[in-house]
Amino acid sequence: MSISRRVFVKSGGVALFSLGMDPLFLARAALGSYKPLPPVAACCRPVLVCLFQRGAVDGLNMIVPHGDPLYYRERPRIAVPQSDVVDLDGYFGLHPRLAALKPLWDSKRLAAIHAIGSPDATRSHFDAQDYMESGTPGVKATPDGWLNRYCQHDREHQDTPFRAVAFGPELPRILAGTAPSLAIADLQAFGLRAPQAAARDRLTRAFEELYAGSATGLLSASSQEAFEAVQTLKRVDPTQYQPANGADYPRGKLGKAMLEIAQLIKANVGLQVAFADVTGWDTHVNQGATEGQLAARLAELGQTLTAFAQDLGEKLDDVVVLTMSEFGRTVRENGNSGTDHGHATAMLLLGGPVNGGRVLGAWPGLDPASRFEGRDVAVTTDFRDLFAEVLARHLGARDLSAIFPGFTPDPARFPGAIRG
Amino acid sequence: MKTRVVRFLTIVVAWPPAVGAQHAAPSTPRDSALHALNRLAYGPRPGEIERVAAGGVLRWIDAQLAPDKIDDETVAKRAREFDVLKYDRGDLARLYAEVQRARQQRKRMGDTAADKPDDSPIAMRGRRFAAQVQQLAVVRAALSERQLYEVMVDFWTNHFNVYFAKGADRFLTPDYIEHTIRPHAMGRFEDLLIATAKSPAMLFYLDNWQSIAPGAFPRSPLSALRREDQEVRRAPKGINENYARELLELHTLGVDGGYSQHDVIDVARIFTGWSIRRPQQGADFEFHDWAHDTGDKQVLGIEFERGHGMDEAIRLLKLLADHPATMHHVSRKLCQRFVNDDPPDGCVDDAVAAWQRSHGDIRDVLRAIFHGPDFWAAANIRAKVKTPLEFVVSAARAVDAEPDTTPRLAQVVARLGEPLYLHVAPDGYPEREDAWVNSGAVLDRMNAAVALAAGRLPGAVATLDSVAPVTANPVQLIAGIDGGILGGTMSENTKRVIAEQVSDITDPVQARALAVGLAIGGPEFQRQ
């Protein structure tokens, strides 16, 4: 017989044989019920969902400059043929495997921004991801991530453990820092596992006391956040969730993460900042054009975003999804029908508040003379200008220079991603 | 540097039992033994703290530094139970090709289930082998007497990371671990570096096998024909910088090692032609003279004259292995692994000095770290949080579990965030606690601890009798667990909570299992 069953028999017996309850167990039960549940957060709070495409997505094959013959000249094997591109504005178009997103573009809830990236020239995935997450290009010593710094400086939302959530087994750099944030690998399995509710509650309380009394440092803060979240989730019951409006999330980690984000948004548990990431963009070899490796990743991304928008329905009016990737890829294809590490890339914005239906950012062109170091798309928008705009105009952040130290965000440079 | 050597001598002379008072936090030989077992090994097994303390901690460390002299027949016998070791990379490549063909076949037949998990016997065998490779790492870590050696295998596996699920690496990775990493894990860094550079797994993972001088074309008409036959569009057409960049940034100099984009390109040019033969049939290393860039190159200001073919890269690897930036970068990582997430400068200096003296003999570098004052400093005792692998293996060792070939424990390691050999990016799994400690992970560790102690992990059965005898006396029970699992470091709070939890459980066997689960899932056991 397992412990939990044994514990269940013991504590499950409480209701039947209440007279036999020992004083210690009574004291524990009292302690357990004493702690007030966190209040239900107000509805309609703006939500930001950040989606990191790790590995450096090829912006040129995601948002294709099909109006530029140079694009086709530089990529004889991997360019998306003009006939396949889903045209957006006569010059740029969506990769055909993102076609599901076109209706969102047409209803002005999807925008793209091109030639965006870091002022730092690094072509190292690790450094570039680190900079994009810390929000301090060129400075490695920054201890926390910019999403966490936003949470530190805007404390009025800190009434719920679900304010900032990363979907995945590890807390990403972008959310590292002193403000509380959660990492959830699987919403349904979040918490202590035991077959019966009573045993689960008892184990939860035991570990809560262990960590409250003996843990130090990061272990202490993380466990505290965990137990608060367990309590809230008990109310939400994620096992019963059904996506709305026929939304069909693709199988796989990304679809699952976005489904769980939608679920938390709809449950009104106070989610304000969510983060998920998706790998597989480092297409050095056999990247493909209309079909192939990159096409498969884009199809998953497009279907996921479409399902997410459908599932949220009117709730999408309060939500902005922002995709990001550490850098772009070389304009010219390499010797292996792939692309090597480049500089600027493209990002997507989806949601009701988005100034949709347009490709934002100044386009530097593909002409070798205007390329970065003669080979890559040049950066015309510092990623911090976009991130700052989203924080300010969507979430209402006030102290932008504290969130991006060493940088002076200027509304005049905002790319115009959020409707005024 | 001089003062540190003097201090070091003081310690050797005065210790044990009374370690040099100014640095030494471990106040008793037992404390020292626990610290050494936590860092050089995957934690103590029942009774091991006492054994190491009685025999002398320094003597145990010296023994660990000479793994070849440690009898390890038990784990060798267990390893032979893993079928996958009986297959070489050619066999595994054929198995992989067969699975692929079957899948293509199903797709052509319009099988709508083609993207669902493939449950054919051959596909199941492929999955079982993959799981065995991961489980074997856990079994060796848990049961080997050569503990430090297994720790170093894990260290280098991450330092020279490859990704098990990338194409040919599905069948090249097992061979990479057995024949590239393991033979060199406690040898000379230079040998290890050259071995990884030549390994088919690395050549495939970082794409170098396809990197050729621009415009180069195979001279042999036969191979050219074959290439034409296959698919001309897929033939490599130029250099690929991927390996070159990671070689400098991660394997050797470090990202601040003072190289430029120009250096990266010329390193890539030097490595053109380093390729593999018939990747789909097992892939041996092969140098393709025709693909090699025949121009002069310059790396870090040093000229690499044209015309030396494959020797150019060998010369480069030797130069990199012996470069001060490499010594510093790798030493720093070792100090981070063994001493503190933020490695003390003194530790790094000691390691670099030993590296210089020994020309990169890994054992000498490690010896310098373990004998240095930082390793024993109070601030560094229990200063590190265990990685998922360290947590699971140390838990299995604490309860004397003997994991078998079923992948149960490897699955737990994966659920905690560290699926073995499956870190996509070339930087390997992180060493720092902030990568592993978060609310979800902490709960998962508690769950794993309770399951292990309750015997709910078939294939890794806990032997709790070797931790603490069954007793109705909670004070005795807790003292036994404290001594057996935590080396006497259990906090008063933990003792109180466990006592409270077991107080209403009448069956002492169940009480013991719950108490052990709480101790292993509790905060003290997460540290090392």
Image (cartoon, grey):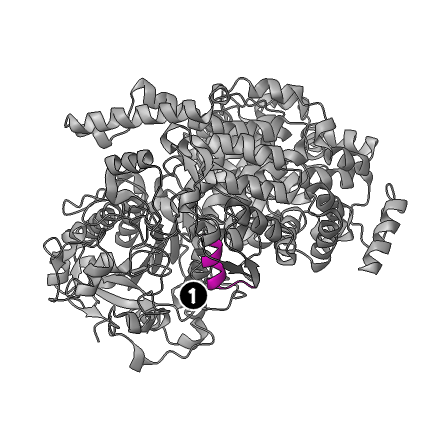
Counting the numbered discs, the total is 1
Front residue of this view, candidates B189 and B71? B189
Q: Is the magenta stretch mostly helix, strand or loop?
A: helix
Q: Does residue A166 lie above or below B503 as drawn?
A: below
Question: Which of the chains bears the disc numbered 1?
Answer: A
Report the span colored magenta: B258-268
- Horizontally, residue A103 falls left or right of residue B398, namely left
Q: Give the residue drawn at x 64%, y 27%.
A: B144
Which residue is most to the right? B13
Q: Residue A55, position in %: x, y?
A: 37, 53
- Horizontally, residue A368 falls left or right of residue B208, namely left
Front residue of this view, candidates A77 and A52? A77
Looking at the rendered image, the quarter that the N terminus of chain B falls into is: bottom right
Quadrant assignment, res B4: bottom right
Looking at the rendered image, the quarter that the C terminus of chain B falls into is: top right
Q: Does residue B125 lie above or below B372 as drawn?
A: above
Q: Dot 1 corresponds to which residue?
A: A146
Q: Can residue A167 be seen in this view?
A: yes
Q: Residue A371, position in %: x, y?
A: 31, 70
Q: Can residue B471 be seen in this view?
A: no
Q: Does residue A255 lie above or below B255 as drawn?
A: above
Q: Give the residue drawn at x 35%, y 27%.
A: B96
Asked which secondary structure carries label 1, the reply is helix
Tell me, yes or no, whether the highlighted magenta stretch contains residue B14: no
Q: Residue A106, position in %: x, y?
A: 10, 62
Q: Residue B492, position in %: x, y?
A: 68, 43
Give the residue type at disc 1: Trp
Front residue of this view, candidates B33 and B280? B280
- Horizontally, residue A118 falls left or right of residue A260, namely right
Front residue of this view, candidates A327 and A107? A327
